[in-house]
Amino acid sequence: MDTLYFLVQNTLPVAIPLLLVALGGMFSERSGVINIALEGIMLFGAYFGCLFVYSLQGSALSAQLILVLAMLVAAISGFLYSLLLSFAAINMKSDQTITGTALNMLIPAVILLFSKMKFNSDGVTTNVPFYVRKIPVLGDIPVIGQLFFQNTYITIYIGFVLFLISTIVLYKTRFGLRLRACGEHPHAADSVGVNVKKMRYAGVSISGILGGIGGFFYAVGVMDGNTNGHTGVAGFGFLALAVMIFGQWKPGRIFLAALFFAFLRMLSRSIALIPFLYNLGIDNTFYKILPYLVTMIVLAFTSKHSRAPKAEGIPFDPGAR
Amino acid sequence: MQLDIKKITKSNGFSAFTSALLAIGLGLVCGFLVMLGASPENSLYGFQTLLFGGMTRLGDVVYYATPIIMTGLAVGFAFKMGLFNIGASGQYTMGMFFAMYVGFMFKPPESIHWLLCMLAGLVGGILWGFIPGFFKALLNVNEVITSIMFNYIGMYLVDMLITKNSTMYISIKARTAYLPASAQMPSLGIRNSGANISFIIALLIAVILFIVLEMTIFGYELKATGYNKHASIYAGMNGKRNIILTMMIAGGLAGLGGAFYILSPSTIPGASMTYEPINVIASNGFTGIAVALLGSSNPLGIIFSGLFISYIQRSGSLVELYGYKPEIIDIVIAVIIYFSAFARLMGMAIPRLFKGKKSRHSESHDDASEPDNPPEGPGEEIPASDNPAVEASGKGA
């Protein structure tokens, strides 16, 4: 039972960033823009969130309040960074994959440069204790309390709420319907008066906001509140894209896919703590490779009948047939 | 006179060239602004070094250009078919490992040792290029995702295989051991530089690729598929086979790049290039994307863009003298890629400056930038190209 608690408690802080970033990718792609820049957006959000935490640490504010404020900073910075993609992809009709790659390459260099000049290190290190040993009252519930309300971060509750909001926005609002139309058949949407460019800006911007928050939550839940330009977010943005595809661009399935990937990733980092797997004596590298390998196997089986938005990656041109 | 300019400005090559220059210019402006922000008093000297510093180390420029020309070719060749080979990094790492393995573990006659190592690198790259091609052609998995995943898989795998092999890996130094001299490529004899025969081989390969693309049926099919996938299938071309073949060739090119890198002779006798397994994916693969875009995927253009990027990287290593960090170059390169991605629109705006008036003309296709998209109506495209280009330069400044 203790192993189960351990597994759940350690999976969730990894799953939430994946979930949020994958949801971000979903909004962007559902509006018709491929957002491969999620990796860069995450790192950008994580870095600014951590910088904000750094500037506030030692002040009288409580740790959880700092976390929420820093989350807002991360969201805004993610949004601003995503504008670079929106501009190139929507106004300039650029190749979205290449623009995304450029944005991914840009940000580690910027972070290294800035950190080396300012802190004389590769990134920013913070020491605010975000870790929550036990949530009052809820943590005392037997089993459930131990599973979800002990040894955790409040990021997982915020993340879950954002997930619910995303699902409602996508399926139950007029905005969500229009957004989806722009990704499937922008000309049809255009013909009934939907402003395709605006909707695509909205889609990419939401992905920037969620990507920034996801990046900061990664820094909090996985990196102990630190960010650096060398390891960045360790391919999490790309994994989130795989999660999104595995989840078939649907929030509910993305949620399950994120849990699944987080579980695999958590396994690779904590083999030594799980006696059963440790005794098998398999090299740790195999566990590190596992999430990527499983991604490929899963994609191999699901991509034949892919439910990708039909117009994703194609710049909108009102004059095209 | 007016007529001549029109003829030149209308050609594809001119459009590609001017848009590449524009992207480079904007990238350099960004670099200068960063310098200005970091330490204004040194920025002029720093920028001067950025522009001309590489002149003092031309041997090194050639030497560092070779691997990125290869990865550039790997990305550019796949681009011609409309495939985005972001996996050059993994293919490069695999090629490097295969070459190293043969270098350490095999003892063939000394005279052909380096040749065998090189071929092993080729095989490693082909293997890692085959996988995304296979996934794309037969299982409909986007090659971008496959390539990214296999970048990580390849990197972890290679790092594990190296650290477990006591002949190849010296754990105290946390680096690979020195390769035997017979496994190193013959030097070109430029003093104080590792420039070697691999540069000549890379040039030959680029020329061969140019011939393949321009003068063979396979090259024609490849480009046709890049322009319009559905039309080429309708015309009876075997799309699936061509996808796999293209990715294998691209992988092989990147693999050779990795082999060239690790097999370079050292300027210090008895030493060699080494590899540090620290679980980071190879950046030369990503630099290849910039090289390919700047060279508009043309093998001959890639030679020049590879030399340029290498040159500016060498210059970048010198700006530390003025207290700047070499990461500035990575920023410049990333900005160049960013602007290259919509270079076609900008490239179309520039000839219009020469012409001076709005005239309808069929747009010049730069197949590198947007191979997958359906051709847009010329009437719609031209007015749209005016404003954003102005905005773009405003943004860069």
Image (cartoon, rainbow, N blue to C red):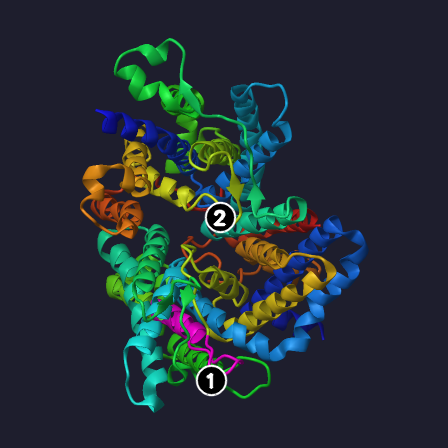
Q: Mark 1 highlights which residue?
A: B197
The residue lying toward the viewer, choosing from A65 and B276, is: B276
Which residue is pictured at 53% across the width and 22% down the height? A63
Badge 1 local density, few (<14 within 10 Å), some, or many (20+)? some
Residue A136 x %, y %: 40, 11
Query: Which residue sits at x=52%, y=52%?
Result: A105
Q: Is residue A176 left or right of residue B51?
A: left
Whether residue B211 is situated above or below residue B378 in the rendered picture = below
In magenta, the rendered stretch is B251-272
- Answer whether residue B356 is magenta in the image: no
Q: CA distance from mark 2 to mark 1?
A: 35 Å
Q: Quadrant of residue B15?
A: bottom right
Q: Is residue A278 visible?
A: yes
Residue B354 visible to an observer of this rendering: no
Q: Is residue B379 left or right of residue A136?
A: right
Q: Which residue is mark 2?
A: A100
Quadrant of residue B244 within the rendered picture: bottom left
